[in-house]
Amino acid sequence: MKGNEHMSHRQRLEAVFAGEEPDRTPILGGWIACAEHICALAGATADEYWADPEKVSIRAYKELGSDGLIDLYMQKKPGEYRFVDTDSFWRAVTHLSLDDTISRIDDMPSAKEIEAEFDFDASYEAFKTQMLRRQELCGDMVWMPAQWGGGARISWYADFGYENFFCIVGMYPDRAKKLMDVGGAQGRNQLQVAARAIEEGLYPHAVLLGEDICTQRGPMISPAFMEEHYAPNLRRGLQPLLDVGCKPVWHSDGDVRQIMDMLIDCGVQGFQGFQQETGLNIEYVAKKRTRDGDPLLIFGPLAVTTELPVCTAHEIREKVRHAIDVCRGNAHLVMFTANTINPDVPLENIIAMHEAVGARE
């Protein structure tokens, strides 16, 4: 490693975001959705956790040596294994008919109306207040929450249900286009706010965003539809980040290989994940380049399905070192996981991941 060997967490992350070499590979946290693991790391009791899960969670990541936090996935109640529970999980939307869905889309304001009515100042003040509050709790760790749906939005199935949404895409092109345009207006507004925070030094120069629009067999919507209706909105929506020198990093659930070049052409400069069982691995991603020909920024690549739950701690350390070797000279790496760390991941493997980059001594 070159350069300053005593970088702060923020300096280390910003060095990688700028394409420079840090003193060590930085590592991100925030996705451990297991209260028992959080308590063990923080040296806290279960009662202390449930009294203030935010405080105990942040303490756990400090003990691990995390450089930044993408989020805090805190269990909602004992017995739930993710940060969602039976009340918030995306189930089928059974109360909406297709006709109801069409009516709701028709009643939506247009993209132009959404942008014209957007109160930037109020939105920014609310965003700033939340950023400052959580950053104060994080101390010298960098709070850099993901901006899901930022730039544009294609995954409206959470609002209307899968069947209704895909019927709209396949049977009602005018309504489908309106959804893409509305999502584009909302996503651009969101990233205009984030861009201001970056300019003011409240947020670092990389943002995790994106949507779950791919299964393990590829995109749920045809790439041709996405190229025509989604890509123009995403390209416009990402521009506020690019204008302030920030790198959009795309969350890669499923097999995104068919749309990866489209995303890069829209301005995406990095990827987070990956589900290696689909064939999307770090060797494949590290060879890609941005639309300007620069190396990509990678958040990853440890899998929460085929690696972290089943490997030994020694094997996890080897996989971390392998990822660092693959990216050296090819891509800029921030160590992270592909998705949520659930209770099936042994605590010693979480610790091994951090030890392997030198975050935990």
Image (cartoon, rainbow, N blue to C red):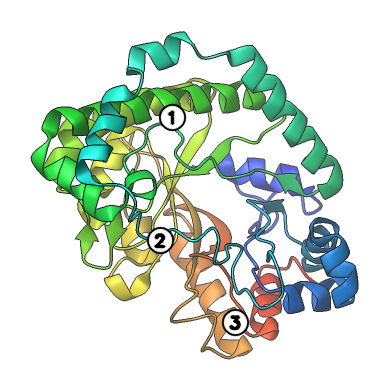
Q: Amino acid at mark 2?
A: Arg
Sequence-first tag of 3 and 2 = 2
The amino acid beneath tag 3 is: Val
Q: Mark 1 = which residue?
A: 187
| Most foreground residue, 147 or 319 | 147
Q: Locate residue 37: give its quadrant.
A: bottom right
Q: Cα distance, mark 3 to mark 2?
A: 26 Å
The answer to whether residue 5 is seen in the rendering is yes
Q: Give the CA distance from mark 2 to mark 1.
A: 24 Å
Residue 340 found in image quarter: bottom right
Residue 58 % position (x, y): 80, 58
Q: Mark 3 sits on what residue?
A: 345
Q: Residues within 10 Å of mark 3 (few under 14, many from 20)?
A: many
Q: Which residue is mark 2?
A: 91
Check whether the beta carbons of the residues at disc 3 and disc 2 lie within 8 A of each other.
no
* Quarter assignment of residue 93: bottom left
Pick whichever of labels 2 and 1 is earlier in the sequence.
Answer: 2
Above or below: residue 71 compared with residue 233 = below
